[in-house]
Amino acid sequence: NNGVDFSNHSLELKVLDPFLVHSISPTKGSIDVTPNIVLNGAKFQDVANLSCLFAHQYWVPSSFIDSSKIECPIPRLVRPGNISIELFLNSFPISIGPPLIFFHINLSFSSIKKKK
């Protein structure tokens, strides 16, 4: 088009470096006691539509803390055991680093019996 724009509309394209995720804290806990996890790393940016994916099926919005910390609430639907955690921007993976695993411990009781 010889460098000529045929539209009055503009669209901003922002290219981000991958977020470097090193670890999570805590690495284990109960949702009742530990409602959130923090992703620790570098090159984090405060952008809209950033989310965490737990166990490859539970999406939750994340909260930017600073360039090295992002916080994610742990979904109440996850089952006890090892849970994978991934960081996404607009449903696309945005982070690089080691696999992130949170060990969910179930502290709920099904019944309580009186000791005789």
Image (cartoon, rainbow, N blue to C red):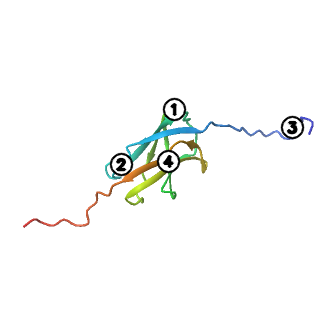
CA separation in Å, label 2 and label 3: 54 Å
Amino acid type at circle 1 is Ser
Give SS at disc 3. loop
Q: Residues within 10 Å of mark 3 (few under 14, many from 20)?
A: few
* Residue picked out by circle 4: 99
CA separation in Å, label 4 and label 1: 20 Å
Image: 96 above or below 104? above
Residue 114's x, y, as percent? 12, 66
* Residue picked out by circle 3: 5
Say whether residue 100 is left or right of residue 9: left
Q: Which mark is residue 67?
A: 1
Say whether residue 108 is left or right of residue 92: left
Give SS at disc 2. strand
Q: How crowded is mark 4: few (under 14 residues within 10 Å), some or many (20 or more)?
A: few
At horizontal 71% and vertical 38% (from top left) the residue drawn is 13
Q: Nearer the viewer, mark 2 or mark 3?
A: 2
Which comes before the other along the chain, label 3 or label 1? 3
Which comes before the other along the chain, label 3 or label 4? 3
Q: Nearer the viewer, mark 4 or mark 1?
A: 4
Give SS at disc 4. loop
* Mark 2 touches mark 4? (CB < 8 Å): no
* Residue picked out by circle 2: 28
CA separation in Å, label 2 and label 4: 15 Å
Q: Nearer the viewer, mark 3 or mark 1?
A: 1
CA separation in Å, label 3 and label 4: 44 Å
Amino acid type at circle 2 is Lys
Amino acid type at circle 4 is Pro
State the quadrant of the C terminus.
Answer: bottom left
State the quadrant of the N terminus.
Answer: top right
